[in-house]
Amino acid sequence: MRTADFHYELPPELIAQKPVTPRDSSRLLALDRVTGSMAHQSFTDLPGHLESGDVLVFNDSRVFPARLYGHKPIGGKPTGGQVELLLLKRVNERQWQALVRPGRRLQKGTSFFIDGYDGGLAEVLDVVDDGTRLVRLPEGLDLSAVGVVPLPPYIKKPFGDPERYQTVYARPEGSVAAPTAGLHFTDCLLGEIRKRGIETVFVTLHVGWDSFRPVTVDDPRQHRMHSERYELSPASTAAINKARSEGRRVIVVGTTAVRLLESNADGGPNGETYERAAGDTGGPLTPGHGSTDYFIAPGHDFRVVNGLVTNFHLPTSTLLMLVSAFTGRERVLAAYAEAVRQRYRFYSLGDAMLVI
């Protein structure tokens, strides 16, 4: 298995630049992962693929205003070179691990103003091995007042309402990127799904930088994911465990929720290794919170997930590798080639695929 095995050609004009209205008017490619058959539908057709008793699992993390802009000081005023930060992980009340731009000019000891705040200077405290920075923000800085919701780098212009880059059920803040498979759902569609006897369950995994970080090694098994914070509540855990024990399907919305559930079944919140006998489908899920750097690539033995709602992902990305692990690489790439021929919209704001 090589990273290059997950490459495909995508015309740039198929990269979606703004969301569709209404949300559930996006297209849906329904893929049978056993036969490889495909159906071209609307996302509003999703309930027809679900059965009473299915459990539909969503990641309810909310994107926080993680992007900050600033300027270096000249004569005590913010009139120097422009600075851009993407906050990745809070270290303590004022310190964050962050991506910075321009990186070469923001070395240890560099101070700068944050646009929209005049209460003090931010400072680069250290350069981390992965190229990120440890940054101390000014005391009293309110991110909700000065930060903006970050968009993926392939979206060239803001599209207006930042709430369109949040799911309708987003609750706890903590992600730097939306769990985008959920962007297609409306309150009305969720209501229809529940009326059909399908249970909706919410888990939390705060999406980090790895949604966009490229795989730079030839062998993807050598790629190391950054850890992401998660929470699996007792109620959600019980609902999923009950469904598994009764042989009902667990269908997951988005690759982030897949990683949370599969990592938990493989070890639980404290990282214990679950010893499986031949044919065992993995241990029961364990409620808890913590961090996971679980990476799913072809060869993974899925223990929880029976179906997947997802978007169309970047070539050679960890997300495409996860979908390939669930569906089969050749089958996924054939579906992507068909989506290109049918002019589907790709990436975060694009159309959806159901694998079941």
Image: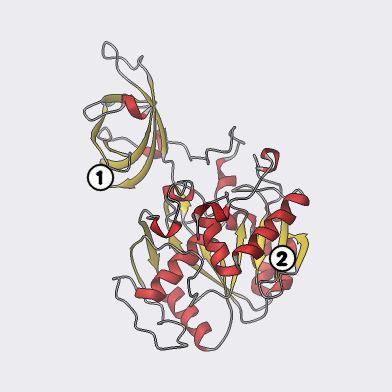
Residue 200 placement, left or right of 35? left
- Could one spot residue 108 in this view of the protein? yes
Q: Position of residue 271 (x, y in %)?
A: 30, 71
Identify the amino acid type marked 1.
Glu
- Residue depicted at x 55% and y 61%: 254
- Could one spot residue 26 in this view of the protein? no
* Mark 2 to mark 1 CA distance (whole Å): 45 Å
- Residue depicted at x 49% and y 84%: 242
| Quadrant of the image occupied by residue 338 | bottom right
Q: Is residue 153 above or below residue 347?
A: above
Q: Position of residue 262 (x, y in %)?
A: 45, 71
Q: Nearer the viewer, residue 3 or 169?
A: 3
Q: Give SS at disc 1.
A: loop
Please report whichever mark, 2 or 1, sits nearer to the chain's N-terminal start: 2
Q: Position of residue 296 (x, y in %)?
A: 46, 64
| Quadrant of the image occupied by residue 29 | bottom right
Q: Give SS at disc 2.
A: strand
Residue 201: give its label.
Answer: none
Q: Which residue is mark 1?
A: 93
Callout 1: 10 Å neighbours few (<14), some, many (20+)? few
Callout 2: 10 Å neighbours few (<14), some, many (20+)? many
- Residue depicted at x 50% and y 53%: 3
Q: Is residue 336 above or below residue 94?
A: below
Name the colouring of the figure.
secondary structure
Q: Nearer the viewer, residue 220 or 253?
A: 220
Identify the amino acid type marked 2.
Ala
Quadrant of the drawing holding the C terminus: bottom right
Q: Which residue is mark 2?
A: 30
Q: Position of residue 256 (x, y in %)?
A: 48, 60
Q: Is residue 89 above or below residue 283?
A: above
| Quadrant of the image occupied by residue 267 | bottom left
